[in-house]
């Protein structure tokens, strides 16, 4: 079988699993693609506005919701029944826009069926959400303009794609300069062998399609996302004994990354003597702002940062909420090489230390 034929067969397998086999989140065999345990309190009323059928057909891992979204244009990759799109539609406001892309007809039918319902529920004069059918590996074939999205999100879907490098490259091309890809997905601590990748149940459950984490880092950098930042992670448990036996030699993690489209980022954490002060003005984050797992920035406190972190705050939608200290005139060497050890641990707690890099 050719590579193209194999990819087509894999897509059809996923379409069948999520369009016909699964009828609700209760049908899932693992917790890889379904958890709201750590959801912030302010998001719960937002979810309560979403139609019951949309909620029932949701299979993502939590709610992918980065900060500071009012008025932004968002693309959701693998939008499914539309749950995240309808949640984000409330966060971007009536002047913002959310577009969902999915390849599964049954899921798109659910999402499209409730566009008017949510417009009225949100009190908008017109819908700010739309859905397109397409493959994430072929986003360039859809009517989506390059450099036109502020934020791209995805919720436990990229692991199901046959060509993950293509997905990341298309996402980079679609983002505006300073935009970000903020997404949750499943990763493995080693490469998954082919016989497991070919297992329909393991693949549909978001396990055997998972990237080895270091392969993901390299693919992201090759796509243009020079400095991928891990936001949070948790280990995945498998309660099905049959599946557990098959994959017991591999550890899987659900993790959220943010990737910025910033061409001047460097490959390592370089020290220019810079710092930032968070003003506490991002909505729902008055006391601190968490950029990633190693940068928990308390309000009003001088927080030393590397050049890349400085740019991630200065050259993006977050800039109005920070005071910036320093520039790039003097280089003091490297902060630290973050190394190549497994970045995930048993806790999703962020490091609330005194600044700097990992």
Image: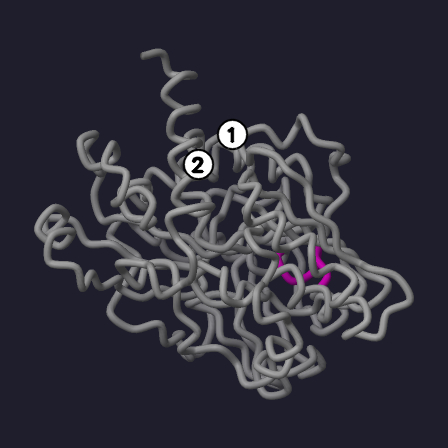
Q: Residue at x 70, y 61 (%)?
A: 114
Where does the image place residue 30, in percent across and percent down from the top left? 27, 60
Q: At 53% from the left edge and 37% from the top edge, which residue is drawn? A: 168
Residue depicted at x 34% and y 54% = 338
Residue named by callout 1: 166
Vertical order, 103 against 326 (above or below): above
Question: Residues in magenta?
Answer: 312-317
Reply yes or no: does residue 94 show up in magenta. Answer: no
Of residues 67 and 272, the one drawn nearer to the viewer in this rendering: 67
x and y percentages locating residue 183 in the rendered image: 51, 55
Q: CA distance from mark 2 to mark 1?
A: 9 Å
Task: Answer whether residue 314 is magenta in the image.
Answer: yes
Tag 2, which secondary structure? Answer: loop
Quadrant of the frame with the N terminus = top left
Query: Does residue 325 sit above or below 197 in this rendering?
Result: below
Tell me whether the residue at label 2 lies in contact with that at label 1, contact meaning CB atoms closer than 8 angstroms.
Answer: yes
> N-terminal of the two: label 2 or label 1?
2
The crowd level at tag 2 (other Cα within 10 Å; few <14, some 14-19, many 20+) is many
Disc 1, SS: helix
Q: Is residue 140 left or right of residue 335?
A: right
Picture disc at residue 161: 2
322 or 239, which lies in front?
239
Quadrant position of residue 23: bottom left
């Amino acid at each position: 079988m050719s590579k193209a034929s194999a990819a087509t067969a894999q897509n059809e397998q996923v379409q069948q699993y999520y369009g016909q086999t699964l009828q609700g989140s209760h049908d899932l065999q693992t917790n890889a693609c379904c958890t709201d345990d750590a959801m912030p309190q302010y998001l719960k009323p937002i979810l309560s506005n979403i139609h019951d059928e949309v909620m029932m057909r949701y299979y993502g891992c939590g709610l992918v919701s980065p900060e500071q979204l009012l008025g932004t244009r968002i693309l959701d990759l693998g939008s499914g029944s539309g749950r995240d799109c309808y949640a984000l539609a409330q966060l971007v406001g009536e002047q913002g826009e959310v577009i969902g892309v999915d390849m599964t007809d049954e899921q798109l039918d659910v999402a499209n069926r409730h566009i008017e319902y949510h417009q009225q529920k949100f009190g908008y004069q017109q819908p700010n959400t739309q859905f397109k059918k397409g493959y994430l590996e072929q986003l360039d074939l859809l009517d989506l303009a390059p450099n036109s999205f502020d934020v791209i999100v995805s919720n436990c879907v990229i692991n199901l794609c046959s060509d993950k490098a293509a997905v990341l490259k298309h996402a980079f091309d679609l983002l505006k300069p300073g935009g970000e890809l903020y997404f949750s997905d499943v990763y493995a601590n080693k490469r998954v062998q082919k016989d497991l990748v070919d297992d329909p149940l393991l693949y549909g459950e978001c396990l055997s399609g998972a990237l080895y984490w270091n392969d993901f880092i390299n693919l992201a950098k090759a796509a243009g996302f020079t400095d991928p930042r891990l936001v949070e992670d948790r280990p995945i448990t498998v309660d099905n004994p049959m599946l557990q036996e098959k994959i017991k030699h591999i550890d899987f993690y659900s993790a959220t990354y943010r990737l910025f489209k910033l061409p001047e980022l460097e490959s390592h954490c370089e020290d220019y003597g810079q710092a930032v002060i968070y003003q506490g003005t991002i909505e729902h984050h008055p006391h601190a702002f968490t950029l990633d797992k190693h940068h928990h920035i308390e309000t009003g406190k001088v927080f030393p940062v590397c050049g890349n972190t400085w740019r991630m705050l200065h050259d993006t939608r977050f800039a109005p909420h920070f005071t910036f200290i320093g520039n790039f005139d003097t280089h003091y060497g490297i902060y630290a090489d973050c190394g190549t050890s497994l970045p995930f641990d048993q806790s999703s707690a962020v490091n609330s230390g005194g600044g700097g890099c990992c």
